Amino acid sequence: MTDTVAEPLTQTAPAEPLSYGSYLEVPGLLTLQRPRTDAHDEILFIITHQAIELWFNCALHELEGVRDALREERFGRARRGLRRLTRMTSLWLGHLDVLGTMTPAGFDEFRGVLGESSGFQSVQFRELEMISGLRDRRYLNLPGATVEERKRLLSRFHEANLNDVFTQVLQRRGLAPEQLFAPGRPEDELRETAEDLLEYDALFHRWRYQHWLLVVRTLGTRPGSGGSSGSEFLRTTLDKWFFPELHAARSHVHATSADAREAESGGAETVYGCPMGYGSELSA
């Protein structure tokens, strides 16, 4: 299928002339930052998380469009959406960089007022995981979620995600994931879409890693807010991927003969990390 040019949307004149501030609801927006202490860094903490939640909302909207385009095999539209999503994820990393200027002492000045609230409770983040390809029933009863938010999570859990839809596309084409990355296969829109999915997955994983590092720097091994285990919990999320079959297929296709012999013998350790070995982690 090919992409088509959409008809322009009908525009309705506003009841009253709009200004920059009224269109964007700036006056109301600026009333939503309500620090509970006089700590200098609390406003940074609030705005960073509010901004990220707004971007989560935008990303969910984009993911729905990418999913629908993949289902209809409109690969050009899907790839444009995926490229936009990677830019969004890079922007989230920038937010974490700014938040990283807050010192552990600065965080401690207002940490006590957070009570049971925790980033673990972000409903939109769990929705992002689910629509991208990662389902986990434990998050259907997310602590702190309202009845309506739990309904949203349940709906996301049962609806088709990006991984489901792309797998269905491959099945309709009679292709296995390994065939997409076979040496000598001509570049085509399906292969390029798979690469864009993996790029989005990699950027999202980088965000997980950067978030973990930020918490390690700020909290160390101390428990997180809301009774969570803090950095230890975040560390356990670093092996989560949206498209594990595509990652495995690409790795398998490009494995060397030595890799294959070692895998068959079972005598070698698996190395995770940089191909050159920097910062790698060994597991027996």
Image: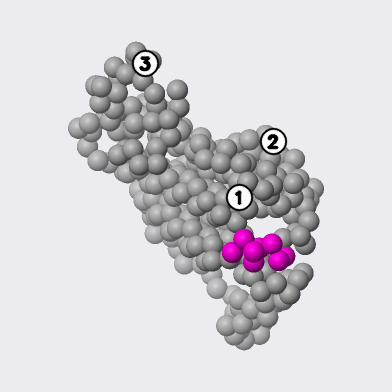
Using the rendered image of the protein, determine whether residue 247 is visible from the camera's viewpoint. Answer: yes
Using the rendered image of the protein, determine whether residue 123 is visible from the camera's viewpoint. Answer: no
Mark closest to the chain's N terminus, 1 or 2? 2
Per the image, label 3 sits on a secondary structure element best described as: loop
Give the magenta part as a residue range: 103-110
Q: Position of residue 221 (x, y in %)?
A: 63, 46
Left or right of residue 127, residue 262 in this image: left
Q: Residue furthest left?
A: 184
Residue highlighted by disc 2: 138
Distance of label 1 from label 3 (alpha carbons)? 36 Å
Distance of label 3 from label 2 (alpha carbons)? 36 Å
Q: Position of residue 212 (x, y in %)?
A: 55, 49
Amino acid at the residue labelled 2: Arg
Residue highlighted by disc 1: 220
Q: Position of residue 265 (x, y in %)?
A: 34, 13
Q: Residues within 10 Å of mark 1 (few under 14, many from 20)?
A: some
- Residue 192 lies within the magenta run: no
The residue that appears at 48% across and 55% down in the rendered structure is 89
